[in-house]
Image (cartoon, grey):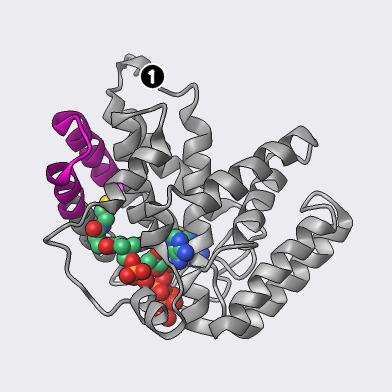
């Protein structure tokens, strides 16, 4: 059989590949504090690595459809935003069917969905375009009492919606610069990705952590991530000790930084866009 050449794939195919690759690489990255990885289930009783992979793969048609919608509408506007909302809700259903009802990637559908559509529209201004899409109000979006909505009401925290509306500052200002810095310091690719995750965790209002462990859990996450980076990062012995301590502390608080994990996937996606399109 003739091998498929990369340039024979459509733009939408390639963007969907990049999004799913980013999700699988995020899941595989180890050791992540209190998250599902190659070692185990972290602070989750209903998740495991195989489920994260299956969930990521189930989202491929959704990412492709989002990119196609962006190409078809051709501009940021309510028609595209509402098409993405519909496609995203169908993607959530596909995810829940695959995982038997477990929420593996809701935040990733939101962040990577917007970024995939934005990359199809404006590859040179991806986060800005994603932010413009996120600022539009989808009239058909249901208003469930989500965990994010509950902690927004309780603590006034800004969650996934605001992160996107602000152009993903955790990714642009924290994750990506740290990824590049750690690579330049020859930390090794896996350590550079861990450092990027930690940089995101230093400042994020992760609503998963807030819901499960309150402000005490959020403070432990931010402070602990900072301590790893201050000790030299994941590639150093001192950093590894701090990372191990952070893992144990978050596990004891049942605090899983699922939002930070989604944003690491967003960071890996943006990092790979250059040169891939
Ligand atoms: C606008 C939406 C993002 C909805 O936002 P909202 O905050 O109302 O909803 P949540 O259901 O809480 O989902 C937000 C998910 O985003 C991730 N996240 C958390 N904090 C941040 C942050 N500061 N910045 C960015 N992203 C963040 C996080 O996802 C991960 O955690 C999931 C597990 O969370 P949870 O269900 O709370 O799980 P557990 O604690 O494990 O539950 P229990 O076991 O205790 O029951 C995991 O899936 C990760 O992905 C938040 O969960 C948007 O989602 C929306 O409007 N959706 C509707 C469809 C749509 O329009 N889609 C968009 C198309 S472009
Ligand atoms: N690796 C992971 N573990 C737990 N929740 C997540 N949400 C997204 N990625 C995750």
Location of residue 202 in the rendering, given as x and y in whole percent from the top left corner: 65, 62
- The residue at the point 65 percent across, 55 percent down is 199
Location of ligand 1 given as a quarter of the image: bottom left
- The residue at the point 80 percent across, 60 percent down is 240
Which stretch did the figure color magenta? 59-86
Location of residue 182 in the rendering, given as x and y in whole percent from the top left corner: 74, 41
Relative to 96, residue 87 above or below:
above
- The residue at the point 29 percent across, 38 percent down is 117
Residue holding disc 1: 6
- The residue at the point 54 percent across, 68 percent down is 257
Location of residue 33 in the rendering, given as x and y in whole percent from the top left corner: 64, 66
Q: Is residue 98 visible?
A: no
- In this image, 180 relative to 13: left or right? right
Relative to 14, residue 226 above or below:
below
- Name which quarter of the figure residue 40 lies in: bottom right
- In the rendered image, which quarter contains the N terminus? top left
């Amino acid at each position: 059989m003739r091998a498929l050449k990369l340039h024979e794939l459509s733009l939408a195919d390639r963007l969907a590949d990049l999004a799913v690759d980013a999700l699988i690489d995020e899941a595989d990255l180890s050791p992540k504090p209190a998250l599902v990885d190659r070692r185990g289930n972290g602070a989750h009783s209903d998740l495991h690595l195989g489920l994260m992979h299956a969930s990521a793969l189930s989202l491929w048609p959704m990412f492709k459809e989002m990119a196609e919608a962006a190409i078809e509408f051709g501009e940021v506007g309510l028609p595209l935003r509402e098409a993405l909302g519909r496609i995203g809700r169908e993607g959530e259903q596909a995810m829940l069917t695959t995982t038997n009802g477990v929420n593996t990637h809701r935040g990733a559908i939101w962040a990577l969905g917007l970024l995939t559509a934005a990359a199809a529209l404006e590859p040179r201004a991806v986060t800005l375009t994603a932010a413009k899409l996120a600022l539009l109000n989808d009239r058909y979006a249901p208003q469930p009492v989500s965990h994010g909505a509950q902690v927004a009401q309780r603590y006034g925290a800004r969650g996934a919606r605001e992160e996107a509306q602000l152009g993903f500052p955790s990714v642009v200002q924290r994750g990506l610069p740290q990824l590049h810095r750690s690579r330049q310091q020859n930390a090794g690719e896996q350590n550079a990705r861990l450092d990027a995750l930690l940089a995101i965790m230093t400042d994020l209002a992760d609503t998963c952590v807030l819901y499960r462990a309150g402000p005490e859990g959020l403070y432990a996450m931010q402070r602990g991530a900072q301590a790893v980076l201050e000790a030299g990062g994941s590639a150093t012995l001192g950093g590894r000790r701090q990372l191990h301590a952070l893992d144990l502390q978050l596990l004891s608080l049942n605090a899983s930084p699922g939002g930070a994990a989604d944003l690491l996937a967003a960071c890996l996606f943006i990092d790979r866009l250059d040169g891939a399109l």
